[in-house]
Image: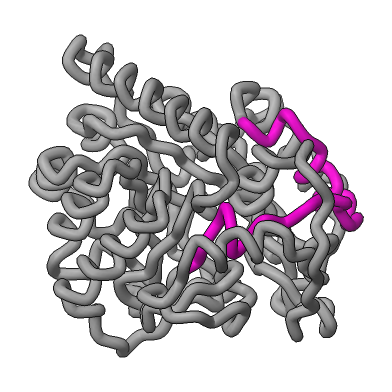
Amino acid sequence: MSTVVVTKPAFEFKPGHRPMPLRRRVKLAMLRLRELRGIASAVLSTGHPYMAQIVPMRRCNLACTYCNEYDDHSDPTPLDEMLRRIDHLGRLGTSVITISGGEPLMHPDLDEVIKRIRKTGALAGMITNGYYLNKERIERLNKAGLDHMQISIDNVMPDAVSKKSLKVLDQRLIWLAESADFHVNINSVVGGGVANPQDAFTVSTRALELGFSSTIGIIHDGSGQLKPLGGEERTVWERVRKLTRRSYSRFNHFQEAIANGEPNDWRCRAGGRYLYVCENGLVHYCSQQRGYPGTPLAEYTTADVKREFLTEKGCAPNCTISCVHQVSYIDHWRAPQSNSVTPPSAQSGHGELVQIQ
């Protein structure tokens, strides 16, 4: 007589949230209208950034082995300085300002930063690991006016590579589903040493069950090299993409080339349409090209935006930063770039460690 072995899951999900209240549906509908206005403004004029990522502190409570965008000791940028930087982004006409890190929820004055972003007229976004979320903090983010939140979840159970696990964060996701007035996106990952690629499908399924949007990213090896996805990784990646048909990345072949380990042919508009403002207040092309152009935000002008819009970046073919590509895609049909620059990381072949869809 054969014996049937039933394997108990590592942990059990709690039930999903209740149907979305009318109040929140109205707020999210208004958000969509503001997003459309920002895109329309970008189509009409190339003289302003569409999106900026700003870092209020480099410190993080976690130490994911693939990440090169954090430390464990630095102090938060003082509030007065953060407000000045937000005002400068407003002066440039930035449509979307996303707070990243490090871990932005560790900044003691984050609510005031979000309020200032909204005061400029920009959409206020945040990328977080979610560890500091609770019911009270979510309500504070609602009151501050946060529009978007992205949480990257790397696995179902924490391991040596990443503690950003569904087991740790699931209760926080339930609280978000119950209370958040802002849009929430959950990003799962494959590649780069992830022990169980199937976790990405579990994470994405759970995100959709709770009423969030879901995307999938590709983690590369420790040197940042482009590597094609393996067989199981590719299968999971395709399954998740089928779950998330509304993803903006489905309108181009950027991710497809990354999954195949192939270069992309595109016009990077970083420094023009997309700005990365580090914890020191300097404007860079992105988190992986620090020093280019390396100009203080207070001195950055519309002329700089227009110059960088027309500057071809030598790192673009092997770039893995999807948010820069998506922003640049707004202008894919416009005139070719006439200037050129090759940052050191492009010469060495290194690039972004994590691609986020």
Residue 189 in magenta stretch: no
- Residue situated in front as seen by the camera: 285 or 162: 285
Q: Residue at x 40, y 43 (%)?
A: 11
> x and y percent of residue 342 in the render?
79, 78
Q: Position of residue 71 (x, y in %)?
A: 41, 84
Does the segment drawn in magenta span residue 251? yes
Q: In which quadrant of the rendered view does residue 16 lie?
A: top left
Is residue 23 rendered to the left or right of residue 10? left
Question: Which residue range is magenta in the image?
Answer: 248-276
Residue name at image x 52 percent, y 45 percent: 187
Measured from the top left, where is residue 264 in percent x and y? 86, 52
Q: Nearer the viewer, residue 23 or 153?
A: 23
The correct choice, above or below, for 113 with respect to 353 in the image is above
Colour theme: one colour
Task: Check the picture and name the quadrant holding the C terminus.
Answer: top right
Q: Nearer the viewer, residue 171 or 152?
A: 152
The x, y position of residue 303, in whole percent, is 55, 65
Q: Is residue 305 above or below residue 66?
A: above
**Image vertical order of residue 218 relative to residue 71, above or below:** above
Quadrant of the rendered image containing residue 61: bottom left
Q: Residue at x 63, y 76 (%)?
A: 289
Instruction: Decide if residue 229 is in sight here.
Output: no
215 in relation to 279, above or below: above
Q: Is residue 34 left or right of residue 21?
A: right
Picture quarter with the N terminus? top right
Q: Is 265 placed left or right of 276 in the picture? A: right
Residue sitting at x 59%, y 50%: 323
Residue 233 in sight? yes
